[in-house]
């Protein structure tokens, strides 16, 4: 993988209506070429964690696609 790009992410979101705790591990990534003032990566990731709303909890364990943009 590209040594200058992140390869794992952690998300923690909490408020009175929603709770999210997720670990995201990169399966593959594709850096995108940009002539503008930012770097951009396209990720295939595995998401594992939980989403909680009042009265319900959902377990996450799913492949997803995400992107990451870094402005210089």
Image: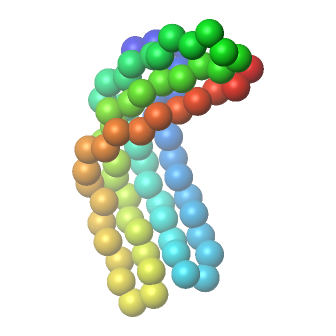
Question: 69 left or right of 23?
Answer: right
Residue 21, relative to residue 26: is it above or below?
below
Question: 6 left or right of 48?
Answer: right
Q: Residue at x 48, y 24 (%)?
A: 41
Q: Residue at x 61, y 82 (%)?
A: 16
Location of the C terminus (image quadrant): top right
Write down the quadrant of residue 31 in the picture: top left
The residue nearer to you, when weighing 37 against 66, is 37
The residue nearer to you, when weighing 29 against 26, is 29
Q: Residue at x 56, y 58 (%)?
A: 12
Write down the quadrant of residue 50 in the picture: bottom left
Outermost residue to the right: 72
Q: Residue at x 41, y 39 (%)?
A: 66
Outermost residue to the left: 62
Location of residue 68 in the rendering, given as x and y in whole percent from the top left corner = 53, 32
Residue 18, relative to residue 26: is it above or below?
below
Residue 53, relative to residue 66: is it above or below?
below
Location of residue 47 in the rendering, given as x and y in whole percent from the top left corner = 34, 48
Residue 6, relative to residue 55: is it above or below?
above
């Amino acid at each position: 993988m590209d040594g200058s790009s992140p390869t794992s992410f952690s998300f923690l979101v909490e408020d009175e209506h929603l709770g999210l705790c997720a670990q995201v591990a990169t399966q593959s990534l594709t850096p995108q070429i940009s002539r503008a003032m930012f770097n951009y990566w396209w990720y295939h990731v595995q998401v594992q964690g939980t989403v909680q709303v009042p009265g319900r909890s959902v377990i996450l364990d799913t492949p997803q696609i995400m992107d990451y943009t870094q402005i210089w």
